[in-house]
């Protein structure tokens, strides 16, 4: 932006509109932090961000006490918004923030915004993770405000159409040179598009110039057709420790390489819990009573609700450098170091007690997976094969997970794939992240949409058979959503996703 004006009127609801990377969230942050020249210091602002960052300290706080302390409101007021309006249960209110799903965490941020009477309410992707009932509640609340000015960044054009009274557009005209200015349009999104027809892509889930190209998933041992199952669940239950009821009960699911599966349901229904079981973060609570089969060589790409957390540990690196760090050893280092794969102290003690040096290889014999075990101070020719069930009974669960992941990566050729700058940038090009940002930029400088492209590109580096997407439409603009939709339709692998975006 250069030499531009911003004028906001009390009681108006503005959509801040522009392509990914033009600086919408940057402007919202500047307003919230009072960094704009000439900004009135006495204005109270409340900023509800998109919740892409995971703060372990924040997530350890109790939901109800956090809301009371952060707003200064009474117990009655806090209980009224949480329980009566947003339908939090008593158990949820007395639990930690980290135990809430992405949708319920967004509801908590909105509850705080309702209780804190501000002059300006800043909403950055407020419908992310929300189910349809909560979106309707939010629409009703925002349109009832008469003394608060609302500024919204969102890719949900239907939501903007229902809520906004004005549009502020990041606009570029020949007489302004390379700079953009903020241009105000009175009226709804549809009225804005009539005045600016070239902006119709905000309504259309289609792509013109932008294309995503997904890598071929490659063969999967024993799977000869696209209709042969690589995943099967029958009668699966899951209950969180200490919970009184099952989060998942009697779940049946079958998937093949031709599967396109969407999980739908209200916030907190257990969609993410099921996804975490499929990617291996959790196990069924009734393993003896259910069937739970996943192909041992299945490669999974998982883009979670909090996918930004990992890339933001590398904010001073370029996207290319991040992928080099993650895959330079021929497997996904980030996944191996995650809690679901990291060997805990008690398992390490069992490994040492068994005098185990490592697992050398794996074979499938008469339908049973067996692993080649190398003990310390024992010659390699004296290695023995032990079944997976026996190794699990010995407490080697995380070691087996690491082994399976490394073998699956080797099957994809990751140990031979060069992690050179040119090779990685070529891969990033397939996801719409240009060299300017991929090779020469830093992750710190990427917009939310560009970070999603990086996260998706990194997840697809291992040529997965199954792509698992938890709320993939968050943070991507309409053109990028069109590119993702087209890429998924053309891709030869399976897709499992959670999304509240009906159009997508």
Image (cartoon, helix red, strand yellow):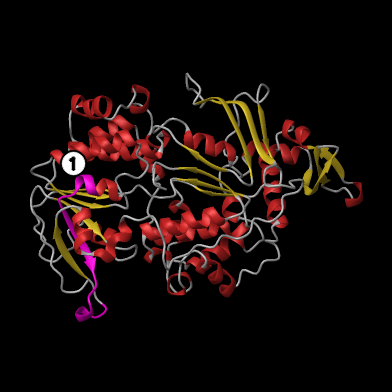
Q: Is residue 359 left or right of residue 426?
A: right
Can you give x and y, in whole percent of width and height, for residue 382 in the image? Answer: 91, 47
Residues in magenta?
161-178
Is any part of residue 424 visible from this angle? yes
Can you give x and y, in whole percent of width and height, for residue 262 in the image? Answer: 49, 40
Nearer to us in this view, 412 or 65: 412
For residue 165: magenta?
A: yes
Residue at 68% of width from left, 40% of height from top?
229
* Quadrant in the picture for the N terminus: bottom left
Can you give x and y, in whole percent of width and height, for residue 493 in the image? Answer: 61, 51
Q: Residue furthest right?
A: 381
Asked if residue 407 is positioned above or below residue 117 in the image, the reply reads below
Q: Is residue 147 left or right of residue 250?
A: left
Residue at 50% of width from left, 43% of height from top?
497
Residue at 34% of width from left, 65% of height from top?
21
Nearer to us in this view, 127 or 418: 127
| Quadrant in the picture for residue 281 | top right
Q: Which residue is denoted by mark 1 in the rendering?
A: 142
Is any part of residue 477 visible from this angle? no
Asked if residue 249 is positioned above or below residue 154 in the image, the reply reads above
Residue at 36% of width from left, 27% of height from top?
92
């Amino acid at each position: 932006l250069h030499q531009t004006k911003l004028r906001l009127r009390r009681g108006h609801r503005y959509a801040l509109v522009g392509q990914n990377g033009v600086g919408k969230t940057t402007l919202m942050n500047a307003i919230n932090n009072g960094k704009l020249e000439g900004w009135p210091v006495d204005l109270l602002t409340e900023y509800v961000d998109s919740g892409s960052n995971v703060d372990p300290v924040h997530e350890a706080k109790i939901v109800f006490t956090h809301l009371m302390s952060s707003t200064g409101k009474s117990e009655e007021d806090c209980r009224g918004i949480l329980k009566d309006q947003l339908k939090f249960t008593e158990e949820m209110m007395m639990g930690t923030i980290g135990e809430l799903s992405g949708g319920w965490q967004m509801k908590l941020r909105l509850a705080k915004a309702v209780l804190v009477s501000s002059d300006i309410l800043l909403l950055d992707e407020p419908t992310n993770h929300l189910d349809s009932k909560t979106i309707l509640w939010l629409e009703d609340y925002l349109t009832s405000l008469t003394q608060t000015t609302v500024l919204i960044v969102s890719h949900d054009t239907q939501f903007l159409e229902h809520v906004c009274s004005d549009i502020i557009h990041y606009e570029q005209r020949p007489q302004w040179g390379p700079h953009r200015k903020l241009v105000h349009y009175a009226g709804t999104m549809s009225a804005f598009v009539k005045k600016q027809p070239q902006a119709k892509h905000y309504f259309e889930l289609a792509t013109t110039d932008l294309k995503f190209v997904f890598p071929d998933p490659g063969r999967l041992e024993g799977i000869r057709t696209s209709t042969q199952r690589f995943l099967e669940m029958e009668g699966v239950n899951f209950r969180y420790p200490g919970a009184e009821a099952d989060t998942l009960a009697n779940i049946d699911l079958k998937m093949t390489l031709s599967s396109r599966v969407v999980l739908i349901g209200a916030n907190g229904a257990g969609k993410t819990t099921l996804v975490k079981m499929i990617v291996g973060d959790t196990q069924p609570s009734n393993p003896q009573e259910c069937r739970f089969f996943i192909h041992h060589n299945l490669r999974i790409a998982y883009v979670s609700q909090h996918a930004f957390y990992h890339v933001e540990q590398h904010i001073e690196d370029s996207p290319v450098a991040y992928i080099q760090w993650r895959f330079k050893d021929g497997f996904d280092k980030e996944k191996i170091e995650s809690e679901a794969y990291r060997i805990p102290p008690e398992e390490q003690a069992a490994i040492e007690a068994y005098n185990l040096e490592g697992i050398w290889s794996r074979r499938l014999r008469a339908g049973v997976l067996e692993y080649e075990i190398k003990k310390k101070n024992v010659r390699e020719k004296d290695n023995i094969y032990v079944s997976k069930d026996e190794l699990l009974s010995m407490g080697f669960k995380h070691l087996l997970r690491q082994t399976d992941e490394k073998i699956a990566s080797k099957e994809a050729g990751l140990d031979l794939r060069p992690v050179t700058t040119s090779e990685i940038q070529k891969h990033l090009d397939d996801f719409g992240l240009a060299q300017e940002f991929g090779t020469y930029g830093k992750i710190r400088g990427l917009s939310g949409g560009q970070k999603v492209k990086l996260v998706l590109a990194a997840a697809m580096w291992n040529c997965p058979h199954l792509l698992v997407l938890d709320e993939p439409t968050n943070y991507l603009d309409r053109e990028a959503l069109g590119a993702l939709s087209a890429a998924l339709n053309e891709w030869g692998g399976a897709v499992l996703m959670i999304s509240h975006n009906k159009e997508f």
